[in-house]
Amino acid sequence: MTTYDAIIIGAGHNGLTCAAYLGRAGLRVLVLERRDILGGVSVTEELFPGFHIDTCAHRIHGIHPSVIHDLSLDNHGLEIQHPSSCVYAPNLDGPSLTLWSDQARTTAGIQAFSSHDAQQWPTFVKFMASATRFLRTLYDHPPIHAPRPQIADAGTILRLARRFKNLTKSDRIALLRLLPASIADVLDERFETAILKGALSAAGIIGLMQGPMAAGTAYTFLHNHVYSPTGAIRATLFVRGGIGGLATALANTAKRFGASVRTGADVQTIIVKDNRAVGVALTDGEEINARYVVSNADPRHTLLTILDPANLTIGDIRKTKEVKFRGAVAKVNLALAERPEFVGASNEEHLHGTITIAPSINYLEHAYDDAKYGRRSSELFLDITIPTLTDASIAPNGKHILCATVQYVPYHLKNNSWNDETRDTLGDQVVETLSRYAPNVPNAILHRQTITPLDLEKDFGLSEGNINHGELTLDQLYFMRPIAGWSRYESPVRNLYLCGAGTHGGGGVTCAAGYNASRVLIKHAKSA
Amino acid sequence: MVASSYELNHDREYYAIRSAAALIDVSPLFKYVIRGPDAVHLLDRVVTRNVAGSSVGQVLYTPWCNDAGKMIDDGTLSRLDDNIFRLTAAEPNLRWLHENGAGLQFEIDDVSDSLAALAIQGPRATEILSTATDSDFSSLRFFRLTKATIRSVPVTISRTGYTGDLGYEIWLDARHAEVLWDALMEIGGPYGLAPAGMLALDIARIEAGLLLIDVDYVPAFKAKIEAQTSSPMELGLGWAIKMDKGHFTGRAALLEESNRGATWKFVGLEVLWGSLEKLYGSVGLPPLLPTEAWRTSAPIYSPRGAQVGYATSGCWSPILKKYIALAHVKTSAATIGNQLLMEVTVEHHRRKAEVIVVPTPFFDPPRKRRLAP
Amino acid sequence: MKKQPFDAIVIGGGHNGLVNAAYLARAGLRVVVLERRHVLGGAAVTEEIYPGFKYSVCSYVVSLLRPEIIRELALARHGLEILPLESTFTPLPNGDHLVRWADHDLTRREIYRHSPRDAEAYDDFGQLLYRLAVAVKPLMSMIPPDVTSLHPRDLVGTARLSKYFHGIESSTFYALHKLMTMSSADYLDEWFETEALKATMAASGIIGTFLGPRSPGTAYVLLHHYLGEIDGAFRAWGFARGGTGAVSEAIAAAARSYGASIRTEAPVAQIMTHGNKVTGVALADGEEIHASIVVSALDPKRTFINLIEPNVLPSEFRAAIDNFKIRGSSGKVNLALDTLPEFTCLPGFGPHLRGAISISPSVDYLEQAYDDAKYGAFSRRPYMDILIPSLIDPTMAPPGKHVMSLFVQYAPSDLAGGWNVQKREQFGDNVIDTLSEYAPNIKDIILHRQVLTPWDLERDFGMTEGNIFHGELTLNQLFFLRPTSSWADYTTPVRNLFQCGSGTHPGGGITGAPGRLAAQRILGSRKA
């Protein structure tokens, strides 16, 4: 029987990244995926004949550059597309707005709304670039030991200090004020155009059970830009062939480094002996031993469901239970007979990135107001992509795919629950909303898939349907992620590690969490 | 709340406990009924004693700890049925029990208000109960319980108590409590049964070497700093920790502590009469003795004068004719027979009386455990 | 130039200005306090608006007046007596109620009636908050460092701050982080299930802020109730005999005893500067008073926008002050009553009327009140913190009669359509209507009513936008960011011009702390 150095539970992008790095470091790695397909939420499935649809995550904002480089993902089939349009914000009551990857083009577009805002734009972009550069230093390393840094943190602290020093004094002050601020305040201070602020603030709330007026949403905005191409705001990138291509490339690399990847292998429990993880047991009874067990599942699912909680202290159980998930997002996937025509879009190029239905900050805040009382938003916020516009290979000729992230759709409904009926009502509401912005959509629908937060939990193992494996709020970031005291990818059980989006760097398809986790584990494995 | 005393002076109440029988209202305890397929599993995670190994009808006295192995509370755990238990506690523990139950199937009823408890304690308790229930109680073993009926009120009776004497606790629906109290007083009157309050009980429990929460130890949740907490080992309850039963909350810390050896011990102290006479004699007085149990902290010194601990309760034991105290003492100074000094105030002046470390209970009559006389 | 009669001028005779003046005078400086109104106290003022009835017009409760100020300025000798509030009574629409008494065991029993679990959690919660209060206290009495400056002088302060963090327990640090970043609703959800308890506790976190209980950053105010306990000022929340004006009078008396002059009806029109240095002030009637030190107790907007020539201040600083958020969110209603109100849920005139009466039945109730304000309306059903001071101090009203103080939130300063007399009365009616749902006899016993909206607070008391804390207490406006980074140590870009109002650390409430810390800073710089 083969014994492994490490078993990775879950073949999401972070699990596979971690596996590839561990394999590259010479460890014998086994990846176990519950489903029959790789990718976790970064999965492309032929949901309808000929339509290869990104079931959950449908776009990326940028992948950790080291991951692409170290694992030479380009040579393993990964091709990332950079559409010229970042965000298109259609407007029913006036002109629509497009944010381009080309700054000058964006500025010119904003000029049509407000010369004040157009003047502010380059400054804003520049400041965001330095702020994200600072953040990237944080994201490239495991969190420092707070409140008492240790020798191991010296490198990180020095790099952070250098970054901080390189900022101008006013940028330093602005950054300090920005981190705990609401995205609404940050934008209100700088801009006056409602649709611009709406389109931007959307990046501060995606996946959050918070409105744009909530403190901490400015940070979420930054988080979503950490690995974006420099200078681009709300950059939308695609993986050619579908987002599943990322998982395929990662899996190929991992395999080349000797890793085994098994699908249809559902882990029932983590085997613990003397407070030390020694392997896993599958639902079919098979037991596999390994020196290390690494979970790509979210912290609650890992520590309280896969692991027997009796292995944890009450304090750690308490902390794990307290992690806020509160899924707020649903997904609607449409197979379309024709290309959607969006209002105000003079040509198709506007639609190549994300189409955001977020006409103003108040629109989003109102949408949140419904959700905080346990109701689906009466006016939904949508982030839409039409990947077939830039990649015809994924649908039959002339046909199109439309993916929509839908918010706010609370996992916890008051006086109601998620079932076939409420799922359909939600799907209908999304189509109705779409019909106002792209009137030809309803009649063009060939197939429709609606994924509620409960479906995300059941089908993708996301606790409470949270796509980020735990809310990205200030109290759950950095040394608090996934739980206080265990932010460095280790867990209270020795030799059990976490590498998913619930850990630092995680949330969004960046592979940063898997990358950081692998480096910690490799260090431990070598010194053991 | 427990009454302090039912008479102006608690003397008679104390003597009722030791020489006849006393009726004590112990209802203010928190009481939980835990049931369900994982009830045993849950309780074994919480308390330090072995619940799975207990039998139906058995009662366990047990402490329970937090993650750091520090005592949260102590109480009795009665196994009413295979999967039904009753836990008593001095502090509310409902939330704590639930937190320990992650992933388990069980239900907890807080019966603190609906379940009353009356303790009948003293050498004649068996006779009184046998009369009251019309059944023979002499066969009920120490820390066992049984069902019975008193004047058509259904009750559960356990041979437990907080006096260190022969005695029972009667558990019943709170609605019948007053009726039952009156009935027992009526039945027990001829046997010398008297109601007793906290003052008398306090002396009895010190003689028995039994801990009082908030006095002899600070429950971990109330401690403002770590140093205020105590482990069961530091409180003389090492015997109640069953390390080999498997996982329970605090086990890892307790295991480490038992390997390392506890820093503190909880000991009995006997004040040497001669020393006391000498201290008081120097101001021209005979020794003045406390009339009630005291609950203040008194520093304990080594003969060379270094502080090695503190006493937390003490009293004059009417039956032993000794001045006794319970104290936390550093392990190195806690050997039985060791002579130490305890601070006493003699005519407004701080003095040090000679004390000797003795085993507890100070008073331990065989009748407490004995079957049929 | 003739010799100046004063070393220092303090602008504004509010409690912070007076505390500052008292400390400066105590140190031997010749100080004059200039107050615009005819009475001292600023927002801490008692006035007999209706014959025989004394209102604590604005500020109505002495929350955290620093005990060291009471000791050092011998305020008791100067007439200060603080009578503790005895309870917090929350009437509920369902006919039930919740009372938190001064006695811990009584409170626990009352909470137990609602939820045994909450009664248990209440103690644990108290322990944790006590620990956090101990940890936070040094920060409250620390002059904030400039962490964005790399100047060696400023690095000392930053080093002191990191040393402070180094010294606290990890678990305390994590708990503190959560408390600082979470919403009070989320924080309390981790502990309690009783709505009325959560809402009443959460309410203390929203007083004076333009945030709802679900807004991140509202949890930390929960600490305030525990801060008093560790200061040797157990049961610190109290009511000053003679109303809050008595606090100001006592401090003024102390200041005078040290030789300070105090002038009322002396409105400052301008702060005069020469080069980059302050030279004195000009009053509205043209009188000029010269001094080498000027301290402003006004809010940052008043001080830096209204009283100083714009070109004196660096543009970055002005921008920061422009961006300083100071939206008012509360109003005040004072009533003269013929007799006591009677609450349906707890009839009679028992001890529950002798403390605070909190209209905060549920977290949703508070959040809905915020929702109204967010979009520019006053709350249809507001949160109210009510006191009947005459029950505690019978001198406040004629025998048998009573005064009632109602603090009301939310009343946005930026009311849609603007405030006017009619809107003010509508607001007042709405308050009485809300109260009458709990105490139906209220409408029949009102002898006189005074209604103050943010509009009135600004006009009558000079608080910009009617913000009672001189600036919102949000995460990015606290500590070294209050009012703005680099100038959070009570200094300003103008030499020898200092700030000492609630717009500086540690912020609002009748604490006197900003006034005292500013005095320390001023006296420290004179020595240097």
Image (tube, rainbow, N blue to C red):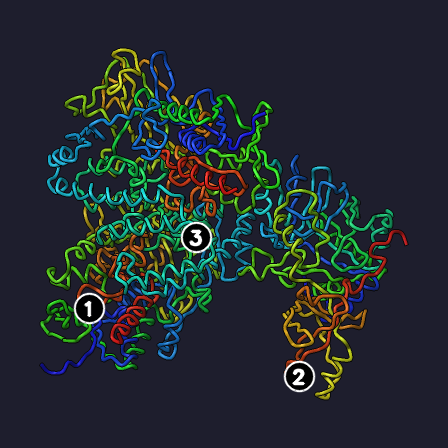
Q: Are callouts 2 and 3 both on one chain?
A: no
The residue to which callout 1 is attached is C497
Tell me where residue C238 appears, x and y as whole percent: 41, 66
Q: CA distance from mark 2 to mark 3?
A: 56 Å
Tell me where residue B247 appears, x and y as whole percent: 64, 43
User: How many numbered badges does the structure rendering display?
Assistant: 3
Q: Residues within 10 Å of mark 1 (few under 14, many from 20)?
A: many
Label 3: state its secondary structure: loop
Does any portion of residue C25 appear in the rendered image?
yes
Label 1: state its secondary structure: strand
Please tell me which residue is depicted at 74% across the width and 66% down the height of the picture: B335
Depth-wise, is mark 2 or mark 1 nearer the camera? Answer: 1
Label 2: state its secondary structure: loop
**Outermost residue toward the right in this view:** B373
Q: Residue C286: give its label.
A: none
Q: Which quadrant of the figure has residue A233?
A: top left
> With B275 as the anchor, is A409 left or right in this view?
left
Q: CA distance from mark 2 to mark 1?
A: 62 Å
Q: Are callouts 1 and 3 both on one chain?
A: no
> As rendered, which of A213 and A291 lies closer to the eye?
A291
> As rendered, which of A404 and C113 lies closer to the eye?
A404
Does any portion of residue C201 appear in the rendered image?
no
Q: Residue B347: give its label.
A: 2
Q: Write down the chain letter for disc 2.
A: B
Depth-wise, is mark 1 or mark 3 nearer the camera? Answer: 3
Looking at the rendered image, the quarter that the N terminus of chain C falls into is bottom left
The residue to which callout 3 is attached is A150
Q: Amino acid at mark 1?
A: Leu
> With C434 as the anchor, is B298 left or right in this view?
right
Q: Write down the chain letter for disc 3.
A: A
Badge 1 vs badge 3, beta-carbon distance below 8 Å: no
Q: Residues within 10 Å of mark 2 (few under 14, many from 20)?
A: few
